[in-house]
Amino acid sequence: MIEIFQYEFMQRAFIAAVLVSVACGIVGTYVVIKRIVFISGGISHAAFGGIGLGYFLGINPILAAIPFSLISALGIGAINQRVKVSEDTAIGILWSLGMALGIIFVNLTPGYVPDLFSYLFGSILTVPISDLYIMLVLDLIIIGTVFLFQREFLALSFDEEFSKVVGMPSELIYMLLLCLVALSVVVLIKVVGVILVIALLTIPAAISKQYTSNIRKLMALSVIIGGLLTSAGLWLSYVFNLASGATIVLVLTFAFGISYYLRD
């Protein structure tokens, strides 16, 4: 186990595993409690439009995915809150639109796009140092926002009707929560890819939820479980020469099955 740390790319990969566990543990807690898993999936797939735009403009696709994901999150929230369209319909529309725009942008990009596959299915082993800095900044933004609005998020997650009655701007807080989901998606894309983001955003929190109902303990436990399982998946992918993103998801799913069985 220790010898793999002699490689710089493995050092970066394990740092990435820690950084993504923070995002998926904190925001994933709200995603599971609020039951907005499929909204998270919609945002992650819509973010592919930003990936494609990044290639087209010749900039870091992760940077391009940030505003694209935020716009998608706000779009889903606005359609759901203000337009007479069901939530799943809004998700489906923006999900398809984001993927379609991403494909168009990639198609318009001159030359061959070498690492597009890594953004679809993840490649934690190829995370550059620049992406680690981006992930760190996004984690700090997530932590700071949750710290400032923890009471509002708590009220929104457990009793949205009550939050409206007491005069809390629940629609604005809901939009802010979706923006945090969008930022988390960007953090996770390079590790597990657009298609597998939902697993990291939900499974650690789902496991933790079986053992505590205290939201702070739930977040802390989700971060720890996410970090351990992501690192375990990363190590297994290295040892057996498997796709890192898919291996991490398999480890997460297996751990959820075991925890559910033991809890039952």
Image (spheres, helix red, strand yellow):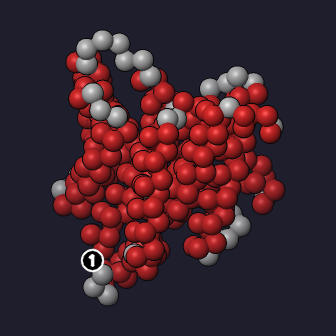
Residue 253: x and y in percent read 67, 43
Residue nearest the viewer, comparing 74 with 158: 74
At 28% from the left and 43% from the top, the residue drawn is 68
Is residue 168 visible in the rendered image? The answer is: yes
The residue positioned farthest toward the left in the image shown: 83
At 51% from the left and 56% from the top, the residue drawn is 23
Residue 140 occupies quadrant = bottom left
Residue 214 vertical position relative to residue 63 in the rendered view, above or below: below
Residue 199 occupies quadrant = top right
The number of callouts visible is 1
The residue positioned farthest toward the top in the image shown: 111
Left or right, 264 with respect to 41, comes to right
At 57% from the left and 44% from the top, the residue drawn is 16
User: What residue does disc 1 label?
Assistant: 169
The N terminus - image quarter: top right
Residue 36: x and y in percent read 43, 56
Residue type at numbered disc 1:
Pro
